[in-house]
Image (cartoon, helix red, strand yellow):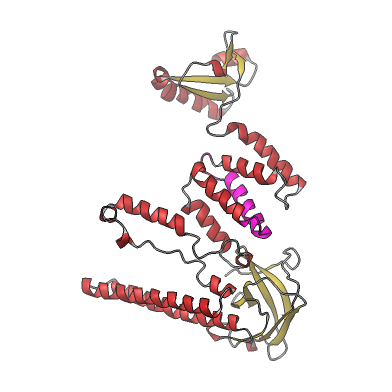
Amino acid sequence: MQKYISILLFLIPSLITGQSLQLQVNLPEASGREIYLAQYYLGNIYAKDTIQTDEEGRGIFKADTLLPQGLYKIYMDENNHFNFLLGSNQQFLIQNESFQSENLKIEGSAEAEAFVEYTVFLKNLQQKNAEIRKQMETANDTERQNFLNELDELTTQLYNYWDDLEKEFHDSFLAKFVKANHVPALKVSTLPEEVQKNDTLLQNARFYFQQKHFWDNFDYTDERFLYTPFFKNKLETWFTKVLYQNYDSVKTPVFNFIEEVKPHPRIFQFATSYFLNNSINSNIMGMDALFVDIARKYYLSGEAFWATEESLGKIRENVLFAENNLIGKTAPNLTLESFDGEYVNLHQIDAKYTLVVIYEPNCSHCRTFVPALYNDVYQPFKNKGLEVFAIYTMDDKEEWSDF
């Protein structure tokens, strides 16, 4: 839990017109205290409203318009806070004797009440799961199989609970929210025997299965998920771990994702900005090409409605710098004078591999790197198709000669 909540009442344009918000709170431990109604947004928490409770810990959060549906928090201090789900009905009573989730009671919203019941059910299920796994550590083969069957039964109970919520609260945010982070597991028994017995093939099967099913239960076109703690982490995991970390492998999935969320302005802005920033700052060689592609398609074309002139200027500058230095691009042609006074054209060098090196003799790194390059790279490979196009950046011929 964060030790503070950011105050952001006006920067997120999050109110929805048409109905009103009225959340009554009854919090005996917050008697005469200031409490916050806090909102999750892309993994952070922001205060949306604050009230002073009376001597019995009662108060009302009011607004003439609805807040976005999502996960919210009642917050008094870093040791006293709890989450609740805010759905389409935003007029109900919240009671909690101790600020502990297990003591939370909701009256007036069936969806919010069902969420509280689900959190209690899930906590009990997790405790049973932990107990079974602890017992498995010292179990024999027969006992272990029985414990595995018990774990399967817990999973079945969870799935059945989700199904029941889907039936009772069809099309509600609750029905989506409870299983949003669940990624189906590959059933190894369904694979060919030769795959099951080969660690490499099995690892690949799991990798591609996760790629295919990572978003099965998460509707990333639903803007309500922006107001939860896990949309940003989910997207980051997908981009940096689920997708194979190579420009050619990520480009199509990333652009497909952006195009799918384009009709939803806030998600379009978030996703496009995320991919742009992470591609230019990536440590993966070649990922700068993704930055150039995104910048040209969405920013420099005018589709990024949120971009300021200042930010567009910086993006345009970075694109101009990067696009001619991308992996696979032909280097710009250079015609430079050699030490002997002859002019050498880069594109006319007849070699299978041409290494372009730009150096300056007074550079301490160059004084170490260039001799090592000559001895460790050029000498062993000069008869195997390698040539070096070394560019001296200064104009002192004596210094050039000595180096």
Image-based side of 139 in relation to 64, left or right: left
**Which span of residues is magenta-colored?**
261-286
* Residue 99 placement (x, y as % from top left): 59, 82
Q: Residue furthest bottom?
A: 56
* Residue 6 placement (x, y as % from top left): 68, 67
Asked if residue 154 is positioned above or below residue 368 in the image, the reply reads below
Q: Does residue 281 show up magenta in the picture?
A: yes
Q: Nearer the viewer, residue 320 or 131?
A: 320
Asked if residue 393 is positioned above or below residue 254 in the image, the reply reads above
- Identify the residue at image location x=65%, y=38%: 319
Image-based side of 390 in relation to 27, left or right: left
- Identify the residue at image location x=68%, y=76%: 37
Q: Does residue 105 show up magenta in the picture?
A: no
- Identify the residue at image location x=53%, y=20%: 389
Magenta-drawn stretch, dominant element (helix, strand or loop): helix
Asked if residue 168 is positioned above or below residue 324 in the image, the reply reads below
The image quarter containing residue 318 is top right
